[in-house]
Structures are given as structure tokens and as C-alpha cells.
Image (cartoon, rainbow, N blue to C red):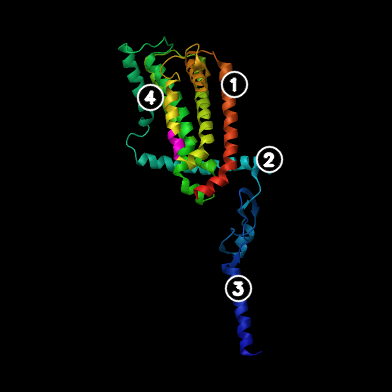
Amino acid sequence: MNIRRMLQLGSSRLAAASGADHGNLRRSPPREVGAGARRRDREGPACGKLDFVGAHAYQQRRMTTFIYTAEPELKRPRDFLGRSFRDLGASAAPAWALFLSSLRAEHRRSWFGYLWLIIPAVGLATLCTFILSQRVVAVGRTELPYPVFVFSGMVLWQVFVDGLNAPLDQLKRSRQLITRSVVSHEAVIGVGALQALLNAAVRLCALAVLILAFGVPVGWGAWLFPVGLLAMFVTGLAVGVATAPLGLLYDDLGRGLFLAVSFLFFVTPVAYPLPERGLFRLNPVAILLDTSRDWLTGGSGGAATFIAVSTVALAALVLAWLSYRIARPHLVARLG
């Protein structure tokens, strides 16, 4: 055996040993690109990249590969629904982690912290009470002391507004994240939902303190008040998720929502009792708010209408979420 042959044999053995110890150079197959999206588990490195993966780790590790095709999402409805709910369940952990990170960042930038959650409600209750005492406006008789009446209405109203604004606000803040990473959009929206629920819990504690301060006798229905809060939140979240796709593409929708919410505030009985007749009864938010506040004094009127409106709101939220998933690939393409 000549010297050249010995050198070639030694080089081949050295390369084999190096590949077994330090990893092999592998090129993954190209992925298909299109409007629809399917996900499957595959053994191998991420698509479209050169990865140095150790031989032992390569055999034991399973990586998720996203394959984009031109196949419509609704061509296989059962697969679409199953994939959607699996993604929704998997988004809980990243949503919680992002929520904790956002919460710590907000505390570092604020001196008053959670006081900002109750300052608007306290301010409106004080202003309305002063106007009423000066007989500037006339408000009908209320079962609750008027400051408690207004504060409880503001607690319910603000959780509705928080749920409405949460999807679009969070998606806009995380625009780079949702277009350049595999973090699910549900996790980003979930951060806003968790923040809104935390805000509602803080305001609910402040309302309990105010009720005790005024000595308001509460009935058994007071335990249902958090259910009313949740119904208001679901209603707002349904509207927010439904309008999020267009809101991400056009800023005009966000400005229009602000005007619509401002108008809706005055036609919702936040600071005055709900009239027995009239167009106010056609406002679903007014029905949820008035029924929930009535529960504080033990009332049970309007429970059937409350259940009907809450059911419709929950169904609307599910439909809005599924519609968003269909529009998601197109949104990423436009935003990216």
C-alpha cells in the first residue's frame, strides 16, 4: 500500500470519527410554501437550514416542522378543528410566561401600579355623585348607594373595554414576534386576556371594600357578580378578536373602535339605571351590565336574557377565533 492510499484511508477514518463525536453536516429538504398551513412531527433538523446535530442527539430528538401549502384550511374541517384546539391548549404555557414577563416590566415603569386600575372608576363615581348632589342632572332611584352604583358599573364596563382592546393591542405590540417566530397568536392574545382578568380582579377587590365602607347589605346573588364580569369580558373579547385582522392591517379600524366605544359608553347604563323601555334594551352590553349589577342586591331579574346573550357572545368568540386562524397566514404575509 503506497503512501497516498494510506493518507486517504486515514483521512476517511478521521472524518468518520469526527462525525460520530462532534456531529454531521446535514441539509434538510426544502419546505413547501403556500396559503394554508399544516404541522407534523418529523425526525430531523429544522427545514431550510444547515444544522450540526450530533448523531446521538439527532436520533433521540424530535423537532416540529411547519409546512406551508396552497391547500385551503377548510378543505379538511375535522383536521382544522383538531389542530386549532391543540394549538390553543399548547399556547397556555407561553402565554403565562409572556404575561409574567410583561407584568414585571410594567411594574418597573410605574410608581402607582394597580392604583391606575381603580383611579378612573373612583374619579367617575366622585364626579357623578357631585353632579347629582348639585341637581345638574336627575337620575332615577337606585337600589345601591349612588357611588357604589357608579363604581360597580365602571368595574363591569372596564372589563368589557379591556377584553375588546386586548387582542389588537397585544398583536400590535408583538408584531415582530408573530411574524418572525413560531410563537402562536393565541399565546399573544392570551397575554392580553390574562392582564384584563387580573385588572378585573383588582377592581373587584376595590368594589368589595367600597361595599363594606357604605354598609351595603348584599344578597346571595352577589356571588354571581364575577359571572357577570366574565360574561362582559367574553363579549368584549369576541368583538376584539373579530376586528383584530383588519385592525392589524389598517390603523383606521382602531380609531373607529375608540369612537364606537365612546358612543357606546353613553348608551350603556353605567351611571344611570336602565330604562324599562326604549332602544337601550336592545344593547346587549347594557343587559349584561344591568343584570350583573342587580345581583349585588340579591335581584334575579333578567337571568334568562343574560344567559341568552352570554351564550351568543361565547359562540361569537369561538367563530371569531376560528376566522382569525384562517386569516392568519395572509396576515403574516402582509405584515412580514
Residue 260 sits in which quadrant? top left
Residue at mark 3 to residue at mark 2: CA–CA distance: 49 Å
Magenta stretch: dominant secondary structure: helix
Local packing at callout 3 (Cα closer than 10 Å; few below 14, some 14-19, many 20+) is few
Check if residue 254 falls in the magenta segment: yes
Local packing at callout 4 (Cα closer than 10 Å; few below 14, some 14-19, many 20+) is many
Name the quarter where the N terminus is drawn.
bottom right
- Disc 1 or disc 4, which is closer to the eye? 1
Whether 54 is drawn above or below 204: the answer is: below
Q: Nearer the viewer, residue 112 or 237?
A: 237
Find numbered disc 1 in the image and state the secondary structure of the residue it sits on.
helix
Q: Earlier in the sequence, mark 2 or mark 1?
A: 2
Q: Earlier in the sequence, mark 3 or mark 2?
A: 3
Q: Amino acid at mark 4?
A: Ala
Q: Amino acid at mark 2?
A: Pro
Q: Amino acid at mark 3?
A: Ala
Q: Which residue range is magenta in the image?
A: 251-255
Q: Earlier in the sequence, mark 4 or mark 2?
A: 2
Residue name at image x 48 percent, y 48 percent: 177
Residue at mark 2 to residue at mark 1: CA–CA distance: 27 Å
Check if residue 84 falls in the magenta segment: no
Find numbered disc 2 in the image and state the secondary structure of the residue it sits on.
helix
Determine which residue is flagged by label 1. Answer: 308
Determine which residue is flagged by label 3. Answer: 17
